[in-house]
Image: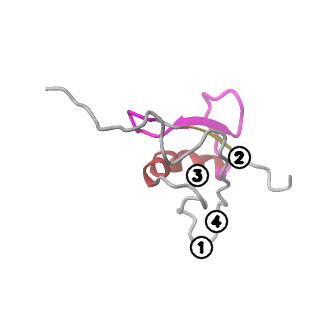
Amino acid sequence: MGCTANVLTPQCPAFEEGQEFIWPSGGENRNAAPDGFLCSGAWDDIYRHITVLAFGGRHPWMDQDGKYLTCCTDGFRPVVFLLERLDEDA
């Protein structure tokens, strides 16, 4: 038995190429996605990687410290996210 989906468009309707989001680590609702981040499933997929970066951790297999490349788990329309730790002094 096969597996199919009724996907009307090959692109994710929640995001556009080049969008940027800033997640402030800390605050009252620090688990919440940033304003404008419209997919709770994608947030759930990438949140664990964001918190590693936000609290000074690193992913040793990445060639640049403070960055991580990941994607959501939508098998039909995955979105790739480049996560970057920002310098608060900048």
Three-letter amino acid code at the position of disc 3: Thr
Name the element at disc 2: loop
Three-letter amino acid code at the position of disc 4: Gly
Task: Compute the Cα span from label 4 to label 3.
Answer: 10 Å
**Foreground residue among 53 and 7:** 7
Magenta residue span: 54-77
The residue singled out by tag 2 in the image is 85
**Foreground residue among 82 and 20:** 20
Residue 22 as seen in the image, left or right of residue 52: right
Asked if disc 2 and disc 4 are in contact, CB closer than 8 Å, the reply is: no
- Tell me what residue is drawn at x 55 percent, y 59 percent: 33
**Foreground residue among 19 and 48:** 19
Tell which circle, 2 or 4, labels the residue nearer the N-terminal end.
4
Tell which circle, 1 or 2, labels the residue nearer the N-terminal end.
1
The residue singled out by tag 1 in the image is 28
Task: Compute the Cα span from label 1 to label 4.
Answer: 7 Å
Image position, residue 36 (x, y; %): 59, 58
Task: Compute the Cα span from label 2 to label 3.
Answer: 10 Å
The residue singled out by tag 3 in the image is 51
Tell which circle, 4 or 3, labels the residue nearer the N-terminal end.
4
The picture quadrant where one finds residue 64 is top right
- Tell me what residue is drawn at x 22 percent, y 30 percent: 3
Three-letter amino acid code at the position of disc 1: Glu
- Tell me what residue is drawn at x 42 percent, y 37 percent: 9
Q: Residue furthest left?
A: 1
